[in-house]
Image: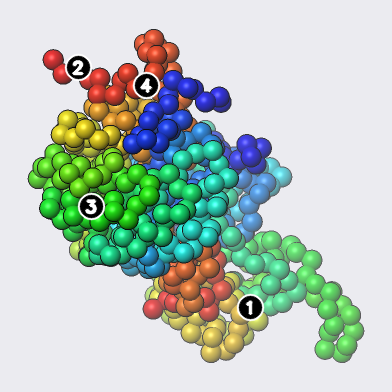
């Protein structure tokens, strides 16, 4: 399949061949899915979160299926930035796609360490994960208070050579306040939503299904919540928005574009169909054909607000 | 790159029978997977109900590469497997696989291999038994120094709660010892009790079953210095090593993860017992 030039978007100064990316944590470093889907077709690969040192993650069970979705409490297991730079970046560089590295940490210093380490690496953007609900320190602790989120954004921006995307949590009272806070901190873009904190109980054993008790919910069941939040965030800030949460079809993805997202990320759906990202890209092209729209950027925020 | 791209296969159900309360025996027409599969591997099955977003990973109980047929013996343990069991012959479903590594059959060639299974861990050992039984063994020096073909000798040690399944089929590939918790068949107790009662000293062990069984078996194998491989089970999402849901604890730092966790779906499901930290 040829690249469709009508799908090009500019995200905080980075040109993407199309607005379809993978969502962090669902796609490994890209290597695993490269056997099933053509990474060259993707707008960008967003990698599994990486920290300054290897993290062991949470005990198992780490996941549970729920109606129309799943809970996960993987806990950001990762091999650390050194292995990531030696092994995963060179692998992704073999493909004609953009590389966005998801960065995690327990403290401001740890985030900044990773951001600094990536400064001279051939990656296109950084996504700062201040919204993981499954680690006790860091993660979501930075993503639920506007002042803290602004502070960590500033610290990352100071250390970064690449555009900084702040990944926001839906587990907040006002997503608009959070979006404005990271914009004030200098963020080049925002991405949302991360998972919604949930819990599942096994009634026959009277135990929590996840070893971590709580986990982040993803999958098609959270899609309407995500669309609402992307719409609110996109209207609160001027920086571009990456929409994600429950995309399982090109229609789901198009809702985010119409709500104001410049790009979209596909996560849990990769588990249901490893070729779903390519189907969404083809679905976008067909949509432009059907309605005679010249370029996808004409559709960003194009929902009828009257 | 496209040439070697893996993909999903549409599998057609050829037959579906309940062989015991809640234990189902399904045969699938899946020629691409059947041509590649080896004993100890599994497939991901994707259910028709779109609300069930995750595949069900199920081990292979039988592989017929020539006819292009896979046999899956599985237990209904929730809504997903219930939906699967309700599907009739002729229905199709999306499938990915074969996945995982499988048992190291070459390690067992020409030796007395003991296959130890507990409950729903038994089915993947049946295909292992068949392939080992039908293998040629290895040429090696006998105790008298003569060069002879040494056949692979298969013993199945099968543990059940009460009612048994797949026993006659195991018996056609080797010796069988049975343990039941209630003593209704064979040794009253667990698989280790059956081993002791029968005076069976394995030369090499391949095992699959519940965690307490595997824990006891690892201790037994380490003590007796018997090479032992264990097939692990864990809740999975992607099945291809990306999501890090299905990890198991390892005794040493894992080469891929750089922490003491290995992925059951891709680094396993079969591990050398010493590799595993079973708690």
Q: Residues within 10 Å of mark 2 (few under 14, many from 20)?
A: few
Return the residue at label 3.
Answer: A154
The dot on residue A304 is 2
* Protein chain holding label 4: A
Return the residue at label 1.
Answer: B204
- In the picture, measured across the screen, residue A123 lies left or right of residue B70, that is left
Mark 4 vs mark 1, foreground winner is 4
Q: CA distance from mark 3 to mark 2?
A: 35 Å
Same subunit: marks 2 and 4: yes
Above or below residue A77? Residue B74 is above
* Protein chain holding label 1: B
Mark 1 vs mark 2, foreground winner is 2
Same subunit: marks 3 and 1: no
Q: Residues within 10 Å of mark 4 (few under 14, many from 20)?
A: many
Instruction: Classify mark 3: helix, strand or loop.
Output: helix
- Mark 2 or mark 4, earlier in chain: 4
Residue B196: x and y in percent read 54, 86
The dot on residue A296 is 4
Residue B207: x and y in percent read 54, 71
Mark 3 vs mark 1, foreground winner is 3
């Amino acid at each position: 399949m040829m690249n469709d030039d009508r799908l090009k978007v500019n995200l905080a100064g980075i040109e993407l061949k199309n607005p379809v990316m993978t969502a962090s944590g669902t796609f490994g470093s890209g290597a695993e899915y490269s056997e099933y889907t053509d990474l060259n077709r993707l707008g960008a690969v967003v990698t599994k979160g990486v920290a300054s040192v290897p993290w062991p993650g949470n005990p198992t069970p780490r996941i549970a299926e729920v109606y129309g979705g799943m809970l996960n409490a993987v806990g950001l297991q990762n091999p650390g930035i050194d292995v990531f730079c030696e092994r995963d970046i060179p692998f992704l560089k073999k493909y004609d796609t953009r590389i966005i590295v998801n960065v995690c940490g327990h403290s401001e210093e740890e985030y900044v360490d990773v951001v600094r380490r990536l400064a001279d690496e051939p990656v296109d953007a950084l996504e700062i994960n201040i919204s993981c609900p499954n680690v006790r320190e860091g993660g979501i602790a930075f993503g639920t208070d506007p002042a803290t989120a602004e502070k960590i954004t500033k610290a990352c921006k100071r250390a970064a050579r690449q555009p900084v995307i702040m990944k926001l949590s839906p587990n907040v009272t006002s997503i608009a306040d959070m979006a404005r806070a990271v914009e004030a901190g200098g963020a080049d873009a925002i991405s949302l939503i991360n998972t919604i904190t949930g819990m599942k109980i096994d009634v026959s054993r009277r135990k929590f299904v996840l070893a971590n008790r709580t986990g982040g919910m993803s999958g098609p069941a959270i899609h309407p919540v995500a669309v609402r939040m992307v719409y609110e965030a996109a209207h609160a800030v001027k920086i571009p928005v990456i929409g994600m949460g429950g995309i399982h079809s090109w229609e789901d993805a198009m809702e985010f574009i119409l709500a104001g997202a410049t790009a979209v990320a596909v996560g849990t759906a990769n588990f249901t169909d490893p070729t779903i990202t390519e189907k969404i890209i083809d679905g976008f092209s067909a949509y432009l054909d059907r309605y005679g729209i010249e370029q996808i950027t004409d559709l960003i925020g194009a929902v009828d607000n009257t | 790159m496209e040439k070697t791209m893996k993909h999903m296969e549409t599998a057609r159900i050829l037959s579906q029978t309940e062989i015991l309360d809640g234990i189902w025996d399904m045969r699938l027409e899946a020629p691409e997977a059947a041509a590649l599969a080896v004993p100890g591997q599994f497939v991901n099955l994707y259910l028709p109900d779109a609300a069930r977003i995750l595949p069900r990973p199920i081990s292979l109980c039988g592989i017929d590469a020539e006819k292009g047929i896979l046999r899956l013996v599985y237990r209904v343990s929730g809504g997903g497997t219930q939906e699967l069991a309700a599907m009739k012959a002729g229905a199709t479903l999306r499938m990915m696989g074969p996945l995982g590594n499988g048992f190291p059959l070459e390690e067992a060639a020409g030796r007395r291999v003991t296959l130890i299974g507990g409950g729903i861990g038994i089915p993947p050992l049946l295909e292992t038994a068949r392939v080992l039984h039908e293998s040629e063994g290895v040429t090696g020096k006998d105790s008298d120094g003569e060069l002879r073909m040494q056949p692979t000798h298969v013993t199945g040690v099968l543990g059940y709660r009460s009612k048994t399944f797949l026993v006659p089929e195991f018996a056609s590939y080797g010796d069988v010892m049975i343990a039941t918790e209630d003593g209704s068949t064979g040794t009253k107790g667990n698989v280790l009790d059956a081993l002791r009662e029968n005076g069976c000293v394995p030369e090499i062990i391949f095992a699959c079953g519940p965690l307490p069984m595997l824990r006891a078996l690892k201790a037994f194998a380490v003590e007796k210095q018997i090479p032992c491989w264990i097939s692990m089970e864990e809740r999975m999402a992607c099945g291809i090593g990306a999501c890090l849901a299905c990890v198991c604890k390892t005794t040493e730092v894992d080469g891929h993860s750089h922490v003491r966790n290995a992925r059951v779906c891709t680094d396993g499901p079969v591990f050398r017992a010493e590799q595993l930290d079973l708690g």
